Amino acid sequence: MCPILLRHVSYILHHLSYILHHVFMSMPVVQGEGDGDVYKVAVKPCVEVTYLTIFSEFQQTVQPVVMEMLNKVQARGCSASDQELFEKEAVYRAVGLAAYELYEQIDYDNWYSTQLIRELEITDQRYLLVRYRVVWLLGNWVSVKMSTELRPSLYSCLLQLLHPSEKLVIRLAASQSLYSSIDDFTFTAEDFSPFISDMISHLLHLLADVEECDTKLKVLQVISLIVDCCGRHIQPHVFAIAQQMPVLWEQSAKHNLLRCSILTTLMKITQGLGEISNSLHSLLIPVIALATDPTQASYVYLGEDGLILWLTTLEYSHSLSLELVQLFSQNMPKVMGLAAHDSTNTDLSPDSLLTCFKIIENYCTLGGADFLQACGGVVVDACQEYITDVKSECTRAILEVLNRVIKASHTGGAQLIHRQLFTVFLATLRAEDHPPVMSGYFTTLANLLYYSSMTFFSLIEQASTHLQQNVENLFCSFVDLWHNKLNIIVSLEQRKMIGLAISTLLPINDRCVLSRFGVLFSMCLEVLHDVCDHNDNDVLFDNLCIPDGVETSEHEEYSKKRSQQLQQVDPVWTVELHRVVSTKLEECELTHGASRFHLLLQSVDWSVREQMCEYLPPEQAVKLLFT
């Protein structure tokens, strides 16, 4: 049965030889040929599926037949008849299709080194079909059974096959085999790095030489994978790729799938260049503007990838340029359905909505108060539109935006988003959301209290009117809720922010604060237990504080560098909590006087005061214990 099947494959491919020889552009060079349900309507895939099914069911019978046929056709060179070459190609295809089933039967390393490479050197036109199948075979076996020592030899071989002087069909097949060799868990950028420059050059030539959209898409996917997998090794070569993108973008105006691939490639180029990618903004921003414009018919196809490219561009930007601000003011209202009288269908998927709020957060980080002054209305409208009508993950993204606004502009920012903060405060009092969302609520209110206590207390007054409750009772209920829910906040960064915020309340001479002094004191202690420790020399330190003199490595990813830059201006990472608590207790004594301060301390349990002494200077600790 197996020889009969292979002869059928041979017969079919005999009629396809014309395509290989004369119509290269229509040759379907596709990763994983025969995938899906195509076997139901096409003869060749039907034969292949039948063969693989028989191989799977009768492996012990079929294996010897295939190996016998392989040994029989090995020695056939360009002097063989056309029928013999077709049979050889069919056997090679059978071996490639059943690579995993023949794993134990074939010494692939030896076969590759002694046979396959030599066959690729045969340039006779009649041997083209076999050469094509050998190139295809390399891609099928590379992830099945090929030693890492032979990888450089494979890359060198594929590099020669990609040369512009080679037949186009061979170049296309080599590009797909290259894709398979890179998209493998044993791939290492170090082994591939000596070949990157020439590989990129040959692939770009191939991209220019092919005309069909689907073929360009396949080649571009190979280039994109190289950029994605080679890390810093690709940086010297990324500009050469980027220079080809504007022409390809214009040529693909009627091919949205190809444009999607271009957007993905640009995203990976941006990541590969890191902070150097700012020089590509003149290319990236117009592309993003078109892809994320809901008034364009292509938005249905390009919108999601365009938003991801927009976010990636911001993540690797040094600062907020005028062009980026204009992009935000023109497109973001339309994308999020905020533009007045906008009839465009802007239903966003949860993932796209999440990306939008991450984009807004990055704008607030890069532009700070200046951005909020220019585009604060869009930020406010976006948060208000979705804050009560999205899933928890997106709610947390909105809360991050609110936190960033507060940190960027303190009281001015808090007043800008006062309405959204009021919504957060009421949602916190209801305490109906999941713990991750409740943690976000408390952290946002902690940021508000730390950076703008005036706005925080104005929220309480507004809520007391809205809920028709006494201000003092509402504040006490909120503090009690905060205390009871402190254990659901698992992030040390969030817990410390809450500790910093609570400590700012200690010296305030307000009846509401004084009525809950003991609870606030206990909350500070609980957070101190979490974030502070003693080193080997019994010196107290804050686990989250960044040590002085820590610098980022030259080769460290820009995203990590930027994260560290943000940490350097964030009190969670720069302010020692135990020193803040100590200072606020001193201020409390100065504000209220020694006698009243002692009365306040008597409202705190003795064991709590005793534990607090660990985190205070000795003279201050004595005051806590002996009052």
Image: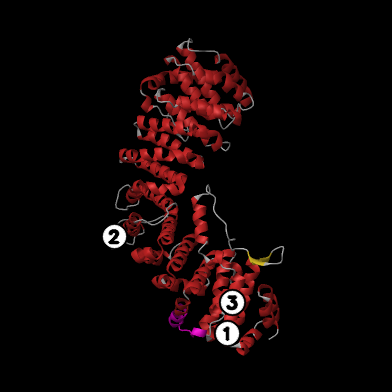
99 or 440: nearer the viewer: 440
The answer to whether 125 is drawn above or below residue 613 in the figure is: above
**Magenta segment range?**
459-472
| Residue at numbered disc 1 | 590
Q: Farthest residue to the bottom: give it.
A: 595
| Residue at numbered disc 2 | 342
**Is residue 259 in view from this perspective?**
yes
Quarter occupied by residue 321: bottom left
Report the disc number at residue 583: 3
Query: Disc 1 residue type?
Result: Leu
Quarter occupied by residue 186: top right
Answer with mark 3 or mark 1, whichever residue precedes in sequence. Answer: 3
43 or 289: nearer the viewer: 289
Q: Farthest residue to the front: give it.
A: 549
Which residue is at 49% across, 52% downward? 559
Query: Disc 3 residue type?
Result: Thr
The spot of residue 469 in percent (x, y) is: 48, 84
Query: Disc 2 residue type?
Result: Asp
Which residue is at 57% across, 23% downward? 112
At mark 3, the secondary structure is helix
* Quadrant of image for the C terminus: bottom right
